[in-house]
Structures are given as structure tokens and as C-alpha cells.
Amino acid sequence: GAGVSQSPSNKVTEKGKDVELRCDPISGHTALYWYRQSLGQGLEFLIYFQGNSAPDKSGLPSDRFSAERTGGSVSTLTIQRTQQEDSAVYLCASSLGEPGGSKTQYFGPGTRLLVL
Amino acid sequence: LAKTTQPISMDSYEGQEVNITCSHNNIATNDYITWYQQFPSQGPRFIIQGYKTKVTNEVASLFIPADRKSSTLSLPRVSLSDTAVYYCLVGDRGGNTPLVFGKGTRLSVIA
């Protein structure tokens, strides 16, 4: 079946502009995660959605970052007034999220964001 | 969330067995240990998960001692294509707390 998809695959923007990154999780997966990975670094957790629960926003680095998940499926990560330090690969993952399950996360290919 | 500690990097020659150890001294009773692999320019992918003793699949083995304060990912006879970053995660499968990735171990396999 289809895996996690993300769009766009690459995004170049100018400092100060807003960007929207999209994630389509695997059908039926109730949990969805956003991560950020700078060049040569590990993954930085940003935000987590689980079903109808309030999202865990504890990883968002500033109020310029926000995310939505509509209808429990597609998610959009929005970065307002982008800064050069926002340049990174933004990865989305989904998992079944069922209680007691393995919570295996399936990752998309990522969106490479470059802020000039 | 239990904190994990892994070596930053490791080197190995092709054909050797590679063992990557992860320390998780504060692991909780309900926590499982999961390893992911990340190739350059790709998202991480699940390798193996275990709770205690030994787990083996077609990719790797996971050894967990009785006190569960550490775990070792064992890759048999590595090849150049095993060059990747390997992440150790510890977390509760039952709750809503997401698993969080650390910095991982960068494995370089040399011909």
C-alpha cells in the first residue's frame, strides 16, 4: 500500500515568507509526527497528533511554527516569517497509534526547506 | 521519557559483525526498546524492537540484559549498504507519549 507522502519535496523561499508543508499519512494511522533534521544532525521532535486528543506541541521551537491535522488524516506544518535557521529537512511520520501496539513510525521522504 | 546514550560514530570493515550499544539507565517497566536505521536523504525506517532477552529478524539481532539498562543492536556481516545512522529509542507502547529520537550512531562501513 501507499506509504507516507510529503509535499513539496523541495522548497526554496526567501527570509520572511511563510511556507506550508504537507503530509499525507498512511491510511488508518491515527498518530502523526513532525520532525526537523538539520544537515548532519539527529531528528528534532516538533509536534505529535494522536486521534482526537490535543496535539503535543512541546517540540515546536517558536510561535512561528504551527501545525494542523484535518479530519484525522492530512497534516500541514506552517512556518511563518521564515528565518535562515529554519533551513532543514522536515520529516513526517505516522503510526497505528493503537494502545499497546508497537508504535512503529513510518516516515515520509521529507521536505527539504532552504531559506535564503 | 527514558534518556538514551549511544556512541556518536563507529567504523567497520565489510563482512564484520557490528555491535552498537545503547544505554538507558532510567528505562521504565513498560518501556520497549526500538531501533531505527536512516540512510542519507531518507527518513528513518524501523529495524527491530524488543522488551527483554533476545530478538532476531532478517536484518539484525537485539540483545537486552536482564536489568534492561542497556541494549545492543547486532548487525551480522555488514556491507557498504549498511552505512547509515542507527537510532535507539525507549518508550512506553501503551500511552500517548510519542517516541523521541536522539542523535543516533553514524556507522561507516569501509571496503
Image (cartoon, coloured by chain):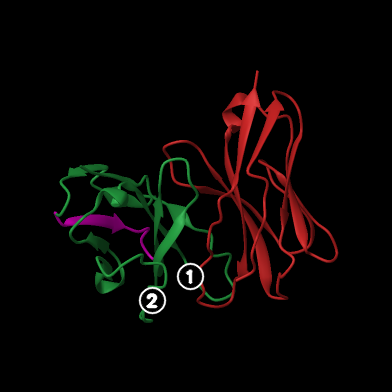
Query: At numbered mark 2, what does the secondary structure look like: helix, strand or loop?
Result: loop
- Of residues B28 and A18, the one drawn nearer to the viewer in this rendering: A18
Q: Secondary structure at mark 1?
A: loop
Q: The chain drawn green is chain what?
A: A
Residue contact at pointers 2 and 1, CB within 8 angstroms = yes
Relative image position of residue A88 (x, y in whole percent): 34, 47
In the rendering, which numbered label is found on residue A51?
Answer: 2
Q: Which mark is residue B45?
A: none
Query: Which chain is displayed in red in the rendered image?
Result: B
- Residue under label 1: A97
- Graded by Cα atoms within 10 Å as few (under 14), some (14 to 19) or many (20 or more), the crowding at tag 2 reads some
Bounds of the magenta segment: A17-28
- What kind of residue is marked 1? Gly
Q: Earlier in the sequence, mark 2 or mark 1?
A: 2
Residue A9 appears left or right of B75: left
The 10 Å Cα crowd at callout 1, few under 14, some 14 to 19, many 20 or more, is many
